[in-house]
Image (spheres, rainbow, N blue to C red):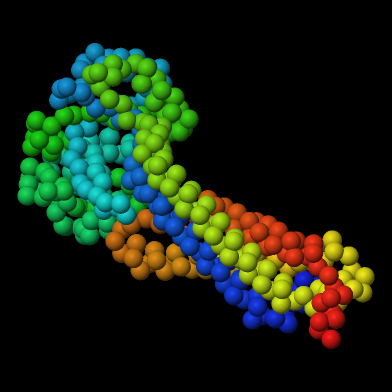
Amino acid sequence: MASPLSPLTYFRRCPGRTLPMAFVIVLAVAAVASVVTIVHSIDLTVFTLYGYNRYLTGLTPRNSLTIPEDQMAAVRKIPEMGEICPSHSYQVMVKTIFGKMVFPVFGLDSPGRDLVMHRAGVTLARGRMVEDGKAEAVLSEDVAHNLNLKIGDVVSSPDSQDAYAPIPIRLVGTLKGRVWLGLTSKALADANSPFTFTGCLMFSKTPSLAEQRKLDRAVEKAIDKGQAREWQYAGLVKETRSALSNLYLILDLVVGIIVFAISLVCGLLSNIYFTQRLPEIATLSAIGYRRPWLMMRAGAETALLCTVGWATGCVVTVCLLTVLKAVFMTPKGLLLNTFDLSAFVLTTPLPLSITLFAFFTIYTRLRTLDPVSIIERRQ
């Protein structure tokens, strides 16, 4: 049998007074975690859209249509250099939660296509691979879904504003894997796009990501940045963090305001509920329970309520985001991580601050409590 002085006793006997506060905590956790997860989907989108950069190093020319031969000679001498695959590419515009973004369809020879697929862990899911010289392309399943394309549909065409190509290019296959890729024939681009620049994709000698990062740094030191530009994963991360820094600052401010407001509201609710329980508290004080013990009991009740409310809020958030992803995001090819741990970490100040606010408001009332006068008024 549970002790009548257990923190659980009040919850069992007075659910009408505890459930409103728990409901506020649940809503606050769901609001904060959902907003943070949606904002973090920007990061997720960028790193998924250009995730192939983890497995290769790109190089494109500046002020010319091809990379100068002296720059190519410099990178070929790099000890970490493995395969160099010339690339002549097209591009499409992928829909994201914050607008359209460029997605490259790499024009590579057959060995280059095989190498990039192997390094990225991507395989053919449906259809077939492109044939050299033919107006064909393969896309990752998620990209094809985002663009609402099926095998046989036109990926790029002369009259398309978002996916231009001099001749219509049809989708002949889809790829599966965690990395998004778009591949076509380099011979096709060479024959039909002679005035667009050509670059190259460079790979380390081994599939190790650490070796690829060493190659990134070596290429950066070897090239003349006025004649060629390197595309590496570290640069992608740095540019993304820099571009989104102000957005994250605003997000932190919003979360801080929500935490403060909810903590203040819950602290006032705790004070109201404590006032309604003054006869109980006064009786316990009169029969010998010291104020530190009463304070600890009130704190335990608040902490337990906040913990349960926070856990319930996390479950509600996952359910809400799962529905949001299934109904609104996935059908449009948009990305959302329903189990974003960093979002839930940002909600942990809520139960802590609510407990502190409630503890302080209860302490101010308990410090001046006169149990005798309260009992006499009740009589």
Q: Is residue 277 above or below residue 117?
A: below
Which residue shows up at 51% across the image and 58% down it?
Answer: 258
What quarter of the picture does the N terminus occupy?
bottom right
Q: Position of residue 44 (x, y in %)?
A: 40, 48
Which residue shows up at 53% across the image and 64% down it?
Answer: 28
Which residue shows up at 22% across the image and 32% down it?
Answer: 87
Task: Examine the image and state in which quarter residue 271 appears.
Answer: bottom right
Observer-nearest of 374 and 227: 374
Q: Position of residue 302 (x, y in %)?
A: 70, 66
Q: Position of residue 73 (x, y in %)?
A: 27, 14
In the orientation shown, which residue stands out farthest toward the bottom? 379
Left or right: where 284 falls relative to 77? right
Which residue shows up at 17% across the image and 22% down it?
Answer: 63
Left or right: where 284 falls relative to 142? right
Observer able to see residue 103: yes
In the orientation shown, which residue stands out farthest toward the right? 288
Q: Position of residue 30 (x, y in %)?
A: 50, 64
Q: Is residue 240 above or below residue 5?
A: above
Left or right: where 246 falls relative to 109? right
